[in-house]
Amino acid sequence: MNKLLLKLSTFAVASVTIVVTLAVPLIAQAQEVKGDAAVGKTKVAMCIGCHGIPGYQASFPEIHKVPKISGQNAKYIVAALSAYKKGERNHASMRGIAETLSDQDMADISAYYSTHGVVAGVTLADKPSKTPSPAVDALLKKGGCVACHGENFAKPIDPSYPKIAGQHADYLYVALKAYKTEKNPNVGRSNGVMAGMAKQFSNNELKEIAKYIGSLDGDLKTVKQASFR
């Protein structure tokens, strides 16, 4: 009996060792890919044709300025690119670009844009630079926007959420409407939290929210690119 117990004990220890050994590579794979901003600078040729031209407008799904991404949170840019690649965000040109990118590419590009145009030592106030009208204030409270995006809409509670203060208002409006869109293979964004928020409002109310947030001081910029790389 003792010999049998010893054999079983030895087998159990060996089994645990094998499981742990196999788990180590899986844990390593699950670790976040680290981006390199310097390398990312060499990978943004497909980005600067739209995001490197101040005031540049897209025409899909309607005419609006392309978003400012210089100064945006790196983890959010990765999350957005991943969503385009997976089809969780429906946008033909962005999906076409995202599908060409590896996880490392996304991490490098995101690291680059998170530092692009950032001026050292310049920080935003903790409160918004403008006070909303009573009507807009009521909409913001109804949506609970500050709970995720921060009191000044530029300090999200999680770096995978976007800074939105100072973003182009027309882009914000189009983005918010996209969360309300369902069963459209060309337009829409799959995000349960944002969909629940956006669906509370009429399009006119979403436009008022976007106008206010877009009018605030923020970290986001469109930095003009001298040439294509």
Image (cartoon, rainbow, N blue to C red):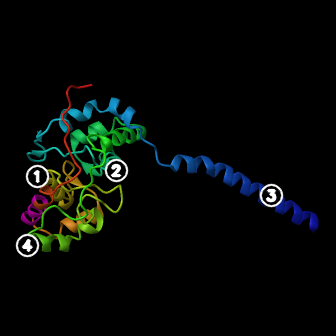
Q: Which residue is pictured at 9% across the width and 60% down the height? A: 207
Q: Residues within 10 Å of mark 4 (few under 14, many from 20)?
A: few
Foreground tag (2 vs 3): 2
Quadrant assignment, res 190:
bottom left
Q: Which residue is mark 2?
A: 79
- Image side of residue 37 versus residue 195, left or right: right
Label 3 near label 1: C-beta < 8 Å?
no
Quadrant in which the N terminus is drawn:
bottom right
Q: Position of residue 188 (x, y in %)?
A: 21, 54
Q: Position of residue 53 (x, y in %)?
A: 15, 35
- Of residues 217 and 205, which is closer to you in this image? 217
Mark closest to the chain's N terminus, 1 or 3: 3
The image's mark for residue 135 is: 4
- Report how far apart the C-alphas of labels 4 and 3 lie in the structure: 69 Å
Label 1 near label 2: C-beta < 8 Å?
no
Range shown magenta: 203-211
